[in-house]
Amino acid sequence: MIWYTGKRLLQMIPVFFGATLLIYFMVFSLPGDPIAALYGDRPPAPGVIDQIRAQYNLDKPFIVQYFIYIGNFFQGDLGTTYSGRPVSDVMAKAFPITARLALLALAIEAFFGILVGLIAGLRKGKLFDTSALVVSLLLISVPTFVIGFVLQYVFAVKLGWARTTVSSEAPLNELLLPALVLASVSFAYIVRLTRASVSDNLNADFVRTATAKGLSRRRVVGVHVLRNSLVPVVTFLGVDLGSLMVGAIVTEGIFNINGVGGTVYKAIKLGEGPTVVSFIAVMVVIFVLANLLVDLLYAALDPRIRYAK
Amino acid sequence: MLSGCAGGEATPAEGDSAAIITTNGSEPQNPLIPTNTTETGGGKIATSIFAGLVSYNAKGETENEVAKSIESDDAQNWTVTINDGWEFTNGEAVTADSFVDAWNFGAKFSNAQSASYFFDNIVGFDYEADSELTGLKVVDDSTFTVELASPEADWPLRLGYTAFMPLPSAAYDDMDAFGENPIGNGPYMLDGEGAWEHEVGIDLVTNPDYEGVRKPANGGLNIVFYASMDAAYADVQGGNLDVLDAVPDAAFESYESDFPERFVNQPAAIFQGFNMPYYLEHWSGEEGKLRRAAISMSIDRKEITDVIFQGTRTPATDFTSPVIDGYSDSLKGAEVLEYNPEEAKAKWAEADKIAPYTGTFDLAYNSDGGHAAWVDAVTNSIKNTLGIEAIGKPYPTFAAALDDRAADKLTGGTRAGWQGDYPSLYNFLAPLYQTGAGSNYEDYTSPEFDALLKEGAAASSVEDATAKYQEAQEVLLADLPTIPLWYSNVTGVWSESVENVVFGWDSVPLYSDITKSE
């Protein structure tokens, strides 16, 4: 187990270098001169652009830019944005808010998704099950921004139960509405995953054996059915944490949350290599760790899976 | 003059003089150093915390602030006298040096300030090396003289622009740190260290010592930065924002009914059109002139502004903007901007006699800026009138489109726009159409236009200058280096708790006049 974890952690090193090099190259390859574009239709004096390009090393070849970035990275300097702010400051502001939002959404979708999916799976074909299927189908087919705008209009503008946008401190109660929007689609998937998995497992041999041994229904469902049914759900949740963190850009825009998605989007549009790569590097680490956690959870959930050498 | 009439007459302030007005903004692109603030996000803040020699009222006229007088006999040698008693919020007096040093800082090559070119008409300016503005001479604490390289009758008009603000001597110790917590002399000041929370907003409070013409009727400003105007609009609806100066496209249909009596829709100092490069076959010489006129007359501007923009654009009649003094809707040759399919076809046919046109007409735009809808409408209008293939040519980003423009690699027309820096005809003409000018990407050159511009600049009065600039525009109407489309409007809404919301010539509300009752 420890050996396995260590091996997986070591694998992060090539992933880190590969991902940063690739992303840096992609930002570098974006068409157009990012500095000239900063000034829009009113170009400054030509000398101004050249000096600023030099200041951000944009006048050097790609690979030199990359190694300057990596060199500084290991000295704890992530570079600056084109407005002169240290990228580390930008990250220190964006990540905590996004992490709170993503974890809140993850908690909501996991709790309600598994609960509804379990009940639906146990009562397959009944009214609850059919309604759950219809609702989840609706949530999957309606785009997130529609759900976002509708919830914002109804609950914040019309009813006044929530604040229309999230204030700068982003307390949990203000994040609840955006988190609901963010969780909606994944919630639907989790309901369907859990339901299918539960109804499969109800017919599995080990469940029949458990029932035949005379275990209570509560124990059969709670320990044998649910625990085994969670394997695909946990996989989904692990991957979803990553997409919730970067993919919240639409929701962040609707509720004016200054988070990771919006910051990366803006940086890509500006062609800010250091900002994009620094954010992506952290995202890569989060993805890898989340996947590792998922793999380790498999062993805990399904006794048939063991990580030997 | 259309500007500033939609907010109603200013009534005696009955609001709470300590109330903080909340409004929308965007993260400044650079630290708040006036000479490095040339975009709207930072400009809005810089004009609130600094007071220059003059400021602009709602009509775009200048009013003296720090200046007592700005005088010249020959439009080339200016004497500026400043009022006594002005102070920066750190207690330092505003003197002639505060201006001269700040302008020298802004103009210096190695400081790489984005507004450096605003000083290029002052003697001593150099685009390629560090040099002192020798045309600026301090006479005494309250007087300095300015020698321009060439006469410019409306030079004082530009002095309300952010680039010409004074700086306290404390700024020069560490300019970047100063830009984080700027110290100004304007109607507002930062609410303590760190009042600017990056990407979130900035808190301004009234400057108790300010005695200029923009004395605030409220207690301060909280400018909230929005990535999406839809969120800002929802915030005004939800009561979290008092004043919004940019209604999002999605609300064009409904903002007038959502905010009855509390909206504005008036032309702004923003000109939009598209340019046809002179290096393309078919688009220069006599043939080019005919084709340009034909294209221009084949576009139904009224219909497009009504349908695509719901009346939030105003069809163009010149090359400037209705909010600028000297704007005209009756220039000689302006009929070329009217929809006239028969005449368009006739001119196109005439051009075909010189050299037959083949291929597809394309119009370049950046697809990240919401331009696709009107570009399609314009190309369809051209296609339907002239019977040629016309399509939009999207570039993924503004940078990509700019690259091809700058490298003379366009295959057709390109979207072009200009927002006035200061309310002057000259500012809408010289940077865009003068031979070799910074934003003249499509290589337009006309000795006649250049000469008229020069004569206008050297005219002894603003009236004479205006006449010359209008004449210069008539040259443009004949040549059409750009096909004018429309003026962007400023569309704004405000909540029930605020009054006296009047938008200035620059599309920014005159914050100091706004009153708020809780």
Image: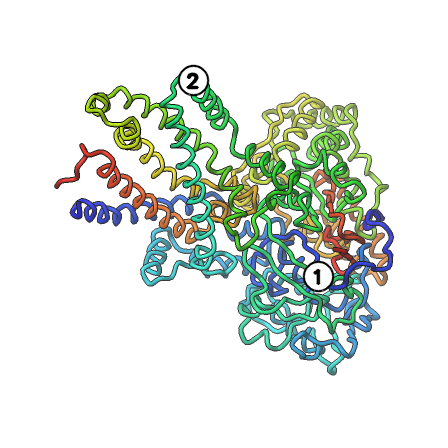
Colour logic: rainbow
- Asked if both marks, 2 and 1, belong to the same chain, the answer given is no
Q: What type is the residue that disc 2 sits on?
A: Lys
Of B333 and B250, nearer the camera is B250
Q: Is residue A23 visible?
A: yes
Check disc 2 and report the residue beneath it. A126
Residue B185: percent from left, percent from top: 70, 71
Check disc 1 and report the residue beneath it. B161
Q: Could you tell me which residue is drawn at 45 percent across and 49 percent down?
A: A100
Q: Is residue B470 above or below residue B210?
A: above
Q: Could you tell me which residue is drawn at 73 percent across and 82 percent down?
A: B141
Query: Label 2: few (<14), some or many (≥20) within 10 Å?
Result: few
Assign a secondary structure to mark 2. loop
Q: Quadrant of the N terminus of chain A?
A: top left
Query: Label 1: few (<14), some or many (≥20) within 10 Å?
Result: many
Instruction: Please identify, in this view, whether the residue under mark 2 or under mark 1 is nearer the observer.
Output: 2
Of A172 and A30, nearer the camera is A172
Q: What type is the residue that disc 1 sits on?
A: Tyr
Of A192 and A262, nearer the camera is A192
Q: How far is disc 2 from disc 1 in space, using C-alphas?
A: 71 Å
For this view, does B351 lie left or right of residue A240? right
Host chain of mark 1: B
Residue B271: percent from left, percent from top: 72, 44
Residue B203: percent from left, percent from top: 63, 61
Q: Quadrant of the C terminus of chain A?
A: top left
What is the quadrant of residue B349 in the picture? top right
